[in-house]
Image (tube, rainbow, N blue to C red):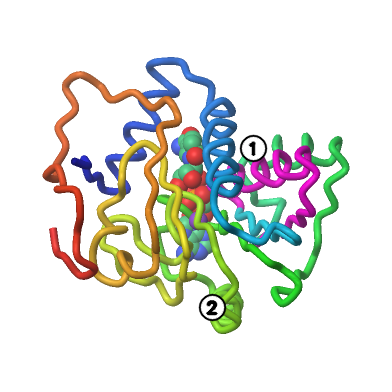
């Protein structure tokens, strides 16, 4: 039994946990990163060269924290920041300054062919438009070489509510989604691109009077089920 949420509902729950409950945002980001690292370690992925793609929002902050944790475990990880780092949210800038102290080298342009596993932390539930052209091209190239991808929260390019592709979207082998399963991961092409979806608790709390707009999903859902 899985409670489904829209992107907006997830953002409301995020904000309630931080603003009302007082859970520090960096704690949620660290727990999200640890959840993904657990899946990386438990899966049958080739960790010879892990490439983390991090964006400029909190999804990217998760990605930078993931790169740091993998590096601390002695895994060969490279971090590519996708976007203009000057426009990055403070949460990302904090993670970037921490990771520099750990000695993780940021790669400007990553060669997907060298990577044995890609961690997609470019966009999550905050995606609100079609991806920029350049990023669409990069994503299509990445999909073409078919490297295994673990998506952080939502595969980049998939709308977490509608399941539609916003210009282009990474095809994930596995999606590690936080708190609740986003409905966009269960319907239309979003259900196909998310691969195996694992829901991980990172300590979010739901307001007592919160009204979910979506039903609780039975255990399995077909690829194009519409909710
Ligand atoms: N909320 C929390 O404290 C936590 C969230 N978690 C993770 O964070 C993401 C949601 O993070 P958010 O910063 O809201 O959004 P994204 O990281 O998904 O997107 C980044 C920003 O990018 C801009 N944006 C959106 N769409 C586009 C686009 N098509 N082209 C260019 N830029 C785009 C947008 O900024 P605006 O200024 O345009 O609004 C986004 O804000 C969530 O998925 C989790 O992974 C943590 O895990 C836990 C704490
Ligand atoms: K992502």
- Packing grade of label 2 (10 A; few <14, some 14-19, many >=20) is some
What residue is drawn where x is 61% and y is 43%?
61
Label 1's element? helix
Q: Is residue 70 magenta-colored? A: yes
Residue 16 at x, y percent in the picture = 35, 25
Q: Is residue 132 magenta-colored? A: no
- Packing grade of label 1 (10 A; few <14, some 14-19, many >=20) is some
Residue 78 in the image: above or below residue 11: below
What residue is drawn where x is 60% and y is 81%?
145
- Give me the disc on residue 167: none
Q: Quadrant of the C terminus?
A: bottom left
Classify residue 31 by image quadrant.
top right
Whether residue 74 sits left or right of residue 206 in the image: it is right
Label 2's element? helix
Residue 45 in the image: above or below residue 37: below
What residue is drawn where x is 25% and y is 44%?
5
Q: Of marks 2 and 1, which one's residue comes earlier in the chain?
A: 1
Where is mark 1, residue-wise? Answer: 90
Residue 65 in the image: above or below residue 210: below
Q: Residue furthest top?
A: 21
Whether residue 23 sits left or right of residue 69 in the image: it is left
* Magenta-tinted stretch: 56-82
Q: Quadrant of the N terminus?
A: top left
Residue 180 at x, y percent in the picture = 32, 40
Q: Nearer the viewer, residue 118 or 196?
A: 196
Disc 1 residue: CB within 8 Å of ligand 1: no
Residue 186 at x, y percent in the picture = 26, 59
Marks 2 and 1, Cα distance to the nearest angstrom? 30 Å
Where is mark 2, residue-wise? Answer: 143
What residue is drawn where x is 22% and y is 45%?
4
Report if the CB atoms under discs 2 and 1 are less than 8 Å apart: no
Whether residue 174 sits left or right of residue 10 in the image: it is right
């Amino acid at each position: 039994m899985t409670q489904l949420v829209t992107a907006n509902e997830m953002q409301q729950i995020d904000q309630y946990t931080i603003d009302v409950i007082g859970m520090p945002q960096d704690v949620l980001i660290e727990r999200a990163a640890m959840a993904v690292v657990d899946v990386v370690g438990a899966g049958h992925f080739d960790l010879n060269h892990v490439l983390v793609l991090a964006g400029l929002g909190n999804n990217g902050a998760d990605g930078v924290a993931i790169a740091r944790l993998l590096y601390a475990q002695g895994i060969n990880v490279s971090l590519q920041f996708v976007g203009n780092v000057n426009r990055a949210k403070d949460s990302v800038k904090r993670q970037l300054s921490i990771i520099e102290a750990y000695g993780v080298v940021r790669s400007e342009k990553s060669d997907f062919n060298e990577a044995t596993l890609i961690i997609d932390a470019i966009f999550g539930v905050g995606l609100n438009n079609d991806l920029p052209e350049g990023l669409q091209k990069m994503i299509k190239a990445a999909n073409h070489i078919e490297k295994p991808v673990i998506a952080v929260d939502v595969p980049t390019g998939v709308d977490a509510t509608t399941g539609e592709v916003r210009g282009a979207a990474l095809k994930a082998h596995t999606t590690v989604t936080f708190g609740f399963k986003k409905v966009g991961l269960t319907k239309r092409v979003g259900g196909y691109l998310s691969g195996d979806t694992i829901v991980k608790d990172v300590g979010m709390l739901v307001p007592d009077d919160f009204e979910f707009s979506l039903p609780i999903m039975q255990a399995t859902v077909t690829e194009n089920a519409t909710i």
